[in-house]
Image (cartoon, rainbow, N blue to C red):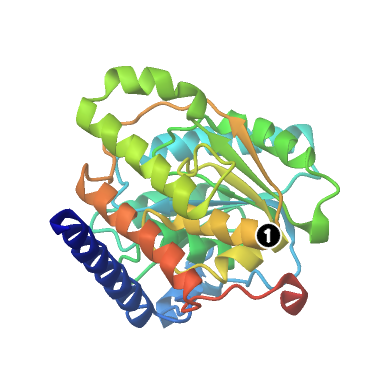
Amino acid sequence: MELCDALQILAALVSSLLSLVLMVAHVSATKMPNLHREKEEKYFENARGEKEAFPSIHDTPTKELSVVVPSYNEEERLSLMMDEALEYLEKRQTQSPSFTYEVIVVDDGSKDQTSKVALRYSKQYGSDKVRVLTLVKNRGKGGAVRMGVLSSRGKQILMADADGATKFEDLHKVENSLKTLQPWPDQMAIACGSRAHLESTSIAERSVFRTFLMYGFHFLVWFLCVRGVRDTQCGFKLLTRKAALLTFTALHIDRWAFDVELLYIAQCLKIPIVEVAVNWTEIEGSKLVPFWSWLQMGRDLIFIRLRYLTRAWKIEPLEKNN
């Protein structure tokens, strides 16, 4: 009898705790995505050193590809990535003049010379090809990518990390994978670069604690939000313009777990997603802080699920979006 009483008390406590978490998740939710931008964030510096207004993702596309590069304190690592990316893009344009592109470097409120480094490329290649969006204050990686996507001109939009961990030439793999999803329903599709094939090697090089955190995060992603995508966090993702428009204008998470919410929204809208293996190398200088960043991501995953469950956050049906 005492054991039954103890179990009933425990069940009541767990139920109360879950109810409290559910209530906190709902009440603390910011109902609308943060699409606001400061006045300074609406402009980029053109080749004449003048301020020119960014376009909108709602506009008709005028480029084949937009590359959005979120950058926070990337003064040291950005050049290597930009050199590799622009060499690939320029070579491709030479071979196929109909191919047009732009690179949007989003300086996420950096405290170093990230914008200055990026502006050198804008002056070298012209502001039609390289634009710098400097955010007034740090938003987080998700917020930075969102601002870049909303300012893009491409028919397809690529997210690419500033550290250059993914080889840029793998873009053709991601593009080919996107094509396998054709015909795209409502012109929407997403191709995700993946490091899942490297997992066994990375486990051998990681500590037991970091491996435990990694598996715990993967389980939470699978259990709460996204199934069918093994690596949600690789920063090399290609979206059709309409897929980017519908997912990023609905995105709430501004920091590390934004990829998970992005794919959760996509799956709710029945946007087809494909995953493709890419070459990836760990680069020193990661902004991910062991344990604390994982803890933040775990909290965000729980809140993503609970806030959509309680309708604090809503995904409009595709018919209404259209």
Q: Is residue 266 visible?
A: yes
Indicate the position of residue 17 as horizontal and vertical percent values: 25, 68
Q: Nearer the viewer, residue 36 or 23?
A: 23
- Measuring from the top left, give residue 25's x and y in whole percent: 34, 73
Determine whether, in the image, residue 146 is placed left or right of residue 265. left
Q: Residue flagged by tag 1: what amino acid is it?
A: Ala
One can see residue 151 in this view: no
Quadrant in the rendering for residue 77? top left
Name the residue tied to disc 1: 243
Residue appearing at x 43%, y 53% in the figure: 70
Q: Residue furthest right?
A: 183
Asked if residue 230 lies left or right of residue 213, the reply is right
Quarter-of-image position of residue 20? bottom left
- Location of the C terminus (image quadrant): bottom right
Where 26 sits versus 79, above or below?
below
Considering the image in quadrants, where does the N terminus appear?
Answer: bottom left
* Image coords of residue 205 (percent x, y): 28, 19
Q: Which percent across, then down, holds residue 107? A: 38, 59
In this view, 72 is above or below 284: below
Instruction: In the rendered view, tell whether residue 312 sits above or below residue 241.
Output: below
Q: Is residue 288 rendered to the left or right of residue 274?
A: left
